[in-house]
Image (cartoon, grey):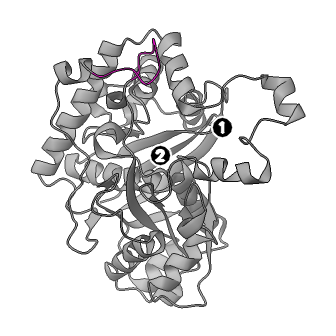
Amino acid sequence: MSEAYIIDAVRTSVGRRNGALASIHPIDLGATLIRSAMARTDLDPAAVDDVVLGCVDAIGGQAGNIARSAWLAAGMPEEVPGTTVDRQCGSSQQALHFAAQAVMSGTADLILAGGVQSMSRIPISAAMTAGREFGFEDPFSGSIGWRRRYGDEEVSQFHGAELIAEKWGISREDMERWALRSHERAHTAAAEGRFAREIVAVGDVTTDECPRETSLDAMARLQPLRPGGRLTAALASQISDGASGVLVASGAAVRAHGLVPRARIHHMSVRGADPILMLSAPIPATEYALRKTGMSIDDFDAVEINEAFASVVLSWLAETGADPARVNVNGGGIALGHPLGATGTKLFATLLNELERVGGRYGLQTMCEGGGTANVLIVERLG
């Protein structure tokens, strides 16, 4: 079986809601990322076997297979195909999994995997609400099988995040301390230029817009998202826009094109859990990955777990025993934003650069996803 090598991992800066990237058509946002990704390697784009991009809410400007559209809008060869993946928040991490699996199986040699999302122009869950004109109030109501199994229980990330906080006894104050740490770490990372290698310009936009100057006192004054709840807007990932991509190559492609791998994929898996709790799946998914590889959580020099909500990360830390000092060390989605379909490979770009910065060997990435699933990826830095 061939190895899956990582040649490069890049991302745009993340634009805040209605910020610097909001006016850009989603196809053009993806195309800008693609052009930049290909320009960083001395590689004929015609050598790429496929383009796999994640995208959630694929309607409007994100509809019609945006992976293909963005590749063509970037001026790339028409003979190279593309496909779009939706595993909710983990869409671009799944795109990377699919790319690596194709390379490892020997059915492809070069794949550009990534994701794109314009949450400013197409609001979260727009694809779900778009179905109302066709008689679907939401994806679940009216399904006999779903109701038989899960009843009328609310299916939403907000409900799941609250349930997690309750189940693991995570207080609002615990979450606020983590959120503040996320912002502080993001500011430090930006000030020290840690994102410089991974960010590609969109016009003159090269800086993440989401990190805020905040405090525990400021967060304590916010009203909960739901009456009597623990979660506030400060404890959730930010609505944002962005694109990201990873170039995956086989050993044969590395040799044929004179490429220099930065890392190799060591493990990939995905597991499911309670879809009502929804966001807890990184816990069993991480346990599964460690069991499959024989690794310990202490073997990782850096970890990225998406901060969809602070309760997701804190429950995962409680169950895995991971060292918080190695987790989201450059900030997470609370500070840096979560452009849904682009976040997976965005986090991967940060994880790879962090391993290189600290001279680490292994990194782990996991994400909670709608439907109660979670991807886990383990990468080994080379060099």
| Element type where label 1 sits in the image | loop
Q: Which amino acid does label 1 sit on?
A: Gly
Left or right, residue 330 beside residue 299: left
Q: Give the range drawn in magenta.
A: 222-231
Q: What residue type is labelled 2?
A: Ile
Q: How far apart are marks 2 and 1 (CA)?
A: 23 Å
Main secondary structure of the magenta stretch: loop
- Nearer to us in this view, 5 or 39: 39
- Nearer to us in this view, 11 or 55: 55
For image coordinates 57% across by 64% down, the residue present is: 99
Residue 226, magenta (yes or no):
yes
Q: Say if residue 25 shows up in the picture.
A: yes
Q: Name the residue carrying label 2.
A: 378
For image coordinates 38% across by 60% down, the residue present is: 242
Marks 2 and 1 close (CB-CB < 8 Å): no
Q: Where is residue 181 in the image (x, y as percent from the top left)?
A: 22, 29
| Element type where label 2 sits in the image | strand
